[in-house]
Amino acid sequence: MRFVHPEILWALTALAVPVLIHLFNFRRYKKIAFSNVSFLKEVKSETTKSSKIRHLIILICRLLAFATLILAFAQPFFPTALSEKMNGSRAVSVYIDNSLSMQGQAEGVSFLESSKQKASALVSSFSSNDRFQIISNNFKGTDQRLLSKDEALQSIQDISFSPETKLLSAVFNRQRDLLKKSAADIRLYYWISDFQQNTSDIQDITNPEDALVTAIPATKDVQKNISIDSIYFSTPQRILNNSDTLLVVIQNHSNEEMSNVPLSVELDGIQKAVSSVSLPANGIATIPVTFSTTQTGFHYGTVRINDFPLVFDDVHYFAYSISEKINILNVVGSEQQNVEQLFSNDPQYNFISVNAAAVSTESIQSSNLIVLQGIQSLSPQLIGDLSSYIEQGGTIFLIPHSTSDLLSYNNLLGRCNSVQLGAKSTTALSAISVDLSNPFYSPAFERLQNNASLPSAISHFPMSNGNLQSLPLISFQDNTPLLAQTNFGKGRLFVSSVSCIKTESTFLSHALFPVSLLRAAETSAAAQQLYYQLGKESYVTLSQSPSTEDGLFEISSTNNSKTFIAQSRSTGRESEVFLPSEMTESGFYVVKENSASLMPLAMNFNNTESNVEIITTDELLKLGQQIGLADFSVKDANAEMLQSLATELGGGISLWKYLIYSGLLFIALEIVFIKIWKSKI
């Protein structure tokens, strides 16, 4: 048997004090004369002998009580083979999973709180000479230094829920980076987590070396959870006063069917829908909600369900904006059709017409839609500006000249992975189909009548779609496109195979032409991302470049409770605004520059944590063996059991608890004997 604190054994010398008191009884007796004492002497002799025995028993109980308590403070233990191996200075790294899935509860206590209790008990059981690393999913800079015992206990108490999620392989690498620098003889790794399957990538840990890893599950029971998986609109652009359908995807992450789950949708604080949803076991349901937006500007929406105890994924925020003006640039050549009348009476559009020879790069970049019509030859400068404009999110509607320079046109079309225009054909053709399934036309037409008159042409530029990147919107009877759409980069290019001359086709006088132009204008606004996820996405995309050299923007919550300064990176017409790490709360925000509001922002928690399926103990052990962890164990223990875990590792089998129990037993026996012999002592 050995002692952790052998110096405390000196306190055993204090046991001599009660022995001396027992041996030297300094009480004085008063002598009283009595006539016949022979009988009394016999009684006294017998009573004195019994009294000494009683006093001796009480003394022994008292000595044993003091002795066991002193020995307990010295922390005796029986060394084991493992404890001999662990003998020396120790550096201990403890990872506490503080992701949102740790909101799960057992007996009314969250997994995170119970994990903190386990971590505190674990650290407390180590020696004050040991050093500790306490890390969570936040990966703070302060994690990369070893702490004293008291500092480690305080660091554990400071941990709170975080939207950050980290893979277990990344956690191990961070632990190893610090412990490798330590001069300690022994390096110990502890993981306290719910070990979700989507984050516990133990199989991806490389070079585990001789790491001594102990996994401590926060729970062994699979939780029930329902989450809002995602939301999206059926069409990419929001149009003023148009009916939009919001699709809400809800997922059941349990093996039980869920019925009558309440669902509500709000927009700008006004309730748009209330319903209930039933979900099969491990099933998904998509709920459509239809409403229209009647005002321009920023709009903020909320989707809610009711589910307990995991509530972080029960509220889903979204935001979008509708521009007050859509900028349309009409770039014309020697041939043109008057399209201004389509937009001049609508205050939503800002229409500008300019000659192709005078168009500037700035006017191109500031436009939502560019109509190119009747330009005989496209200059290299114009080709470069237009292809860059489309790639960065712009929309172009191209109508060729009747004698177009096909080399310049095909140069532009080739850069955009679009169709190629062939030599002009004078074969008379009629259109036979319109792709009403395409989102471009589907909001404008429900169906076409069987005898509907479609455009025809007596001459056109046949389109070839060699790379199959373009979609025919209107097709001739020979299956070549009259009007084709190409998505390139973040933008779109619409190409007509007929020129601006009305005598060459009926397309420009047909109802499909103004509908096509209006749909191109309505959908020219860049598709907006409805929401971002905290801890998962590092930046948001803003459809403009910073106006200052420092490239700083401001991100403020809509209630002005919090404001953050965000750096950015310009990418042409757009900026990538980096989300500050201090943003940890979901909700509504706005991106500003020089106090001007530029973009609404909805932040949600990372839904990776919604899938609560966990890895079992056997699976953990199997994974540890697969990657070659030499010493890997799983301790399904509570805080009390963990109190002795470190002592067992570093000191063998601990005895102090048993000594405490023995000391209490001897004190109890002493009290009992005193009460029984009270009148005889």
Image (spheres, rainbow, N blue to C red):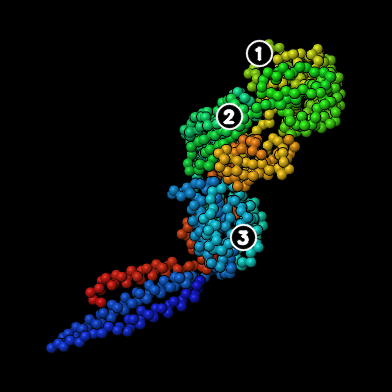
Between circles 3 and 1, the one closer to the viewer is 3
- Residue type at the position of mark 3: Arg
Tag 2 secondary structure? strand
Q: Can residue 362 be spotted in the picture?
A: yes
For the residue pair 118 and 477, the one nearer the viewer reads as: 118
Q: How many labels does the image show?
A: 3
The residue drawn where x is 79% and y is 31% is: 361
* Circle 3 Cα neighbour tier, 10 Å, few/some/many (<14 / 14–19 / ≥20): some
Q: Which of marks 1 and 2 is nearer the N terminus?
A: 2
- The C terminus sits in image quarter: bottom left
Q: Which residue carries the number 3 mark?
A: 145
Picture quarter containing residue 371?
top right
Q: Which residue carries the number 2 mark?
A: 246
Between circles 2 and 3, the one closer to the viewer is 3
Q: Which residue carries the number 1 mark?
A: 449
- Residue 282, percent from left and from top: 53, 38
